[in-house]
Image (cartoon, helix red, strand yellow):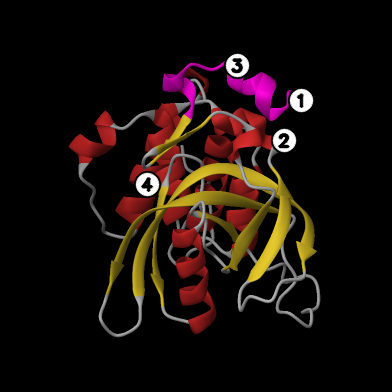
Amino acid sequence: MPGGGAYRRCCSLEDMVKAGNRAYGGPGDIPAVIPIFPLSGALLLPRAELPLNIFEPRYVAMIDAALAGDRAIGMIQPDESKPDLSQGPSLSRVGCVGRLTAMSETGDGRYMVTLTGIARFTVVEEVPAPTLFRQCRVSTTQFACDFATDPDETVDRDAVMSSFRAYLSAHNLDADWDSVNRATSETLVNALAMMAPFGAVEKQALLEAPNLKARAETLVALTKMTLAGEPGSSGQPLQ
């Protein structure tokens, strides 16, 4: 797997991950130690946006620190299969680092923020820190592919759209189809993966899918299983 410097040289500016005013060309552009936000069921993916309502004092402090620094925050899910640690819940092995690209104050001590995903990371170790929030040493080298856009043609878009339509139909929902049809396959798959009402285990599977094609296939499979198990379902797989 190429390192950050080598990877950056083979990418044009247009190929880099853009997050707000910053372009990220490879693993070397990500800080080695980042603040961590453990949040069950939350999913952030590269180039996608995650809105957050920040109100706990430790995470308000985290936003303040990010604004004063490089604006990087690592979203990660607690690992519910392991016991809690003295500093909080055990962490999953893989998360996604995002850049703080929008922020507003509510006047009552909360922040409304948006994180734009940059790349997935593996946790190397948790770093003892005097801050209210937790910090980890992370590596994005395993996910160097996240720093370039996945080719849209690798995705079976018809299968994704079919499962999406079936889900909406089963729940009497509709969508802005003009926007859906205009979206790139990466934008569509990542948005659906982040919005889908799956549990933490399923969200983690979507996060750890090796590439966009695999994430799309996982999304379709999870949607089929969800619909097959809902009351009133025939139990037959979606076509």
User: Distance of mark 4 from mark 3, alpha carbons?
Assistant: 43 Å
4 and 3 marks in contact (CB < 8 Å):
no
Mark 4: secondary structure: helix
Q: Is residue 177 left or right of residue 119?
A: left
- Number of residues whose C-alpha sits closer than 10 Å to that of mark 2, classed few (under 14), some (14–19) or many (20 or more): many
The reply to whether residue 197 is in sight is no
Q: Amino acid at mark 3?
A: Arg
Q: Which mark is residue 166?
A: 4
Earlier sequence position, callout 4 versus callout 3: 3
The answer to whether 36 appears left or right of 158 in the picture is right
Tell me residue 145's x, y (percent): 62, 28
Secondary structure at numbered mark 3: helix
| Residue 1: quarter of image | top right
Which badge, 1 or 2, comes first in the chain's sequence? 1
| Disc 3 crowd, CA 10 A, few/some/many (<14, 14-19, 20+) | few
Looking at the picture, tell me which residue is in the foreground, 59 or 157. Answer: 59
The answer to whether the residues at label 1 and label 2 have Cβ atoms under 8 Å apart is yes
For the point 28% across and 66% down, the residue is 104
Closer to the chain start, of discs 4 and 2, is 2
**Disc nearest the viewer among 1 and 3:** 3
Which range of residues does the magenta coloring cover?
1-16
The residue closer to the viewer here, 42 or 144, is: 144
**CA gap, disc 2 and disc 3:** 15 Å
Q: Which residue is mark 2?
A: 141
What residue is shown with label 3?
9
Task: Please give the residue where the numbered disc 1 appears in the rendered image.
Answer: 1
Name the residue type under label 2.
Thr
Q: Is residue 76 above or below residue 59?
A: above
- State the residue at coordinates (68%, 19%): 6
Q: Residues within 10 Å of mark 1 (few under 14, many from 20)?
A: few
Query: Label 1's element?
Result: loop
Vertically, is 90 above or below 182?
Answer: below
